Amino acid sequence: MASSILKAPKYLILVSPDDCGRNELSLPRAFRWRYQDVLPLTLKLKFRTGYEIWVDRLRGIMKGTRLLLRDLNLEGGELLLLEYCGDFDFVVYVIGVDCCELNYPCVLHEFQGGRPRNVLIRDGGVKFVKRLHTSDGLVDSIDPHVSFLKKFGSMIPSEFEYVVSDGRKLLGSYCMATGELNDLESVWEMLGFELLNSFHILVFTYDGGHCIHVDVFDNELVEKFGDKICRGASSSIPPEVDRFKI
């Protein structure tokens, strides 16, 4: 029998233009209510390029973020996706205003040595976001932003597998003519979502091969696992793709 696994959800921070002038970012309210007593007071934010920065946490506020936002050339409207990895560490992904993962600047923090890493699609895939509205209902198809399709649409096979957070897979399909990802209704059914108000934002991660990972976030910008999630299943599925620079 699979054992229960305590997993902190991923969460999103919407960066505002005002945030870029301040030296702090607020954690989502629902996330900090649940985890502020167990998270350390000093956090290390780690990015795919090797960029790392330490920030202080005071209740629901991360202090010391101005340099980070400047180094990433953020101006407001971007999303930060944070994934807790244990101890002090958070891995951070940046979604640009075009709803696609950022072309990260080749820069390290001013106190780091060495050189930044190239961001490769085989090392963690590439993310894009779809925002939904209650009037949309439980959609069976979505169309990624045109900027994502221009870069990666030709790589997506006509048939692929959706992968949810516990590692379970379902067959999906892609129509190159329309640019649509299809067969999402079976994903919602498997996760136990019956109403659209169960979630608000979809984050897709394409691995460059035959898998697209799906994470769902509620209107508090916190990951929602679903009512039928299999807590003991492994979610580590290594992509098998060639080198490809984003």
Image (spheres, rainbow, N blue to C red):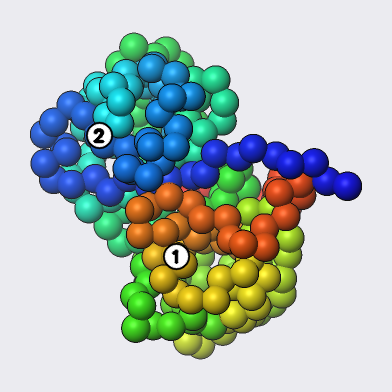
- Amino acid type of disc 2? Leu
At a point 28% along the width and 22% down the height, the residue shown is 58
SS for callout 2: strand
Q: In this figure, which residue is indicated by the disc labeled 2? A: 25
Name the foreground residue: 11 vs 108.
11
Q: Where 55 sits versus 111, above or below?
A: below
Name the foreground residue: 153 vs 127.
127
Name the foreground residue: 232 vs 106.
232
Disc 2 vs disc 1: which is toward the camera? 1
Quadrant of residue 156 within the rendered picture: bottom right
Within 10 Å of the Cα at label 2, are there few (<14), some (14-19), or many (20+) other Cα atoms?
Answer: many
Q: In this rendering, does residue 37 appear at all?
A: yes
Q: Is residue 57 left or right of residue 50?
A: left
Q: Position of residue 226 (x, y in %)?
A: 58, 61
At a point 51% along the width and 71% down the height, the residue shown is 153
SS for callout 1: loop
- Residue furthest out toward the bottom: 177
- Amino acid type of disc 1? Phe
* Dot 2 or dot 1, earlier in sequence: 2
Q: Where 225 sits versus 159, above or below?
A: above
Q: In this figure, which residue is indicated by the disc labeled 1? A: 199
Q: Position of residue 220 (x, y in %)?
A: 35, 53
At a point 73% along the width and 65% down the height, the residue shown is 169
Within 10 Å of the Cα at label 1, are there few (<14), some (14-19), or many (20+) other Cα atoms?
Answer: many
Q: Is residue 91 left or right of residue 182?
A: left
Q: Position of residue 111 (x, y in %)?
A: 34, 12
Q: Position of residue 62 (x, y in %)?
A: 29, 27
At a point 31% along the width and 61% down the height, the residue shown is 98
- Residue furthest out toward the right: 1
